[in-house]
Amino acid sequence: MLGKALYFDKRLSRDGTLSCATCHDPATAFADRNSVAVGVSGKAGTRNAPTILNAAFAPRHFWDGRASSLEEQAKQPLVNPLEMGMKDHAAVVARVSSIPEYRRRFRQVFGAEGVNIDTIVKAIATFERTQLSGNSPFDRFRAGDEDAISDSQKRGWGLFRNKAGCIECHAFSASSPFFTDYEFHNTGVATKGKDLAGIARRAKTIRGAGPDTARTLTLLSHTDGLSDLGRFLITRLPGDIGAFKTPTLRDVELTGPYMHDGSGKTLLDVVRFYDRGGERNPAIDPRMRPLNLSEQEMSDLVEFLRALTSDDVLLRAQTTTPQSRTSATPSHGGARGRD
């Protein structure tokens, strides 16, 4: 598959050290073990790299929802100086076009259209759409197998729906089984000691200085001090200050660290954060409140979340990942290397 080859190809980064799979690794359910993504030259970003599993069903992408399609999403990391770091999309096209095998494969797939930025990201997005969570113990339980999950996990499912109220944002239904409402909420993550309103005024000033291009929004989202404004950077709506997209909980056991800034190292850390009612701030979602969960209840919630792990997710990761991942120096498109 052409998109798969591009997804794992480090030659799409400025210095030949990063691919899409570097931060969205099949071995960690297409997420990242780092708290925040680390780009070319070891530059740290400001946000955790979320899983691409089930991204095919998401109406908007990135933590702040600035991309409305997977194709649009795939364009941005390629030219973000804190991610893959290519100068511009023309440089990406030139890099891919310099590789004879890609020229041949693009002709096979896209005909006369050949290699351009739209066909490159279309191929990547097509591969990403094939990455879906599989059947889990919870799904077997829902299908009638009472023994598929433990008593602790059953109690956790009850807490998830009722006392803890997780389901209010991590929505679940037969028609949308991904444990997310795909909306944006301020739950107090990364707000402690920060003047978000003042930071928002600064962001408005910066945005007012030039056109709202996708690249401008990407750079703002990776600017320390502005990144925690979340959805506000896109909409400028006061109600969106500090709001971030509700992530899927499918395979969440494997996708840590958690939260948009990677501040939750374990699932129990996340549950404890929400048990405290998050971090109070002027824009916090009014539904955020202390939950007063017992230690046993918090443990049961964590156990329930583990029941959402696909039976074959790690096996599929082994078959998805190539034996070697292509890398190269910018001056030589044909060099190959290993992680």
Image (spheres, grey):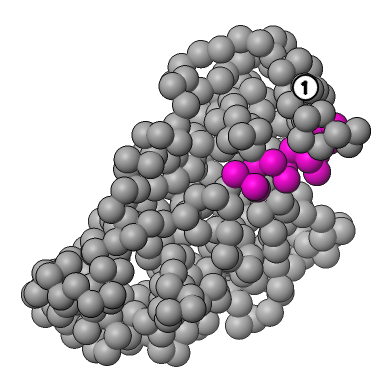
Where residue 24 appears, as percent x and y from the top left, is 48, 43
Location of residue 304 (image quadrant):
bottom left
State the residue lying farthest toward the right: 112
Residue position for label 1: 104
Is the magenta region chiefly helix, strand or loop?
A: helix
Query: Start and end of the magenta stretch?
Result: 114-127
Left or right of 66? Residue 248 is left
Q: Residue at x 76, y 60 (%)?
A: 206
Q: Residue at x 50, y 50 (%)?
A: 131
Image height of 332 relative to 4, above or below: above
Q: Residue at x 70, y 67 (%)?
A: 234
Amino acid type assigned to the residue bearing label 1 in the image: Arg
Where residue 121 appears, as percent x and y from the top left, is 72, 43
Assess whether residue 117 is covered by the magenta stretch: yes
For the residue labelled by badge 1, is the local secondary structure a helix, a strand or a loop? helix
Name the image quarter holding the N terminus: top right
Assess whether residue 14 is covered by the magenta stretch: no
Where residue 175 appears, as percent x and y from the top left, is 49, 78
Image height of 307 relative to 164, above or below: above
Image height of 154 relative to 117, above or below: below
Q: Residue at x 58, y 65 (%)?
A: 58
Name the image quarter holding the C terminus: top left
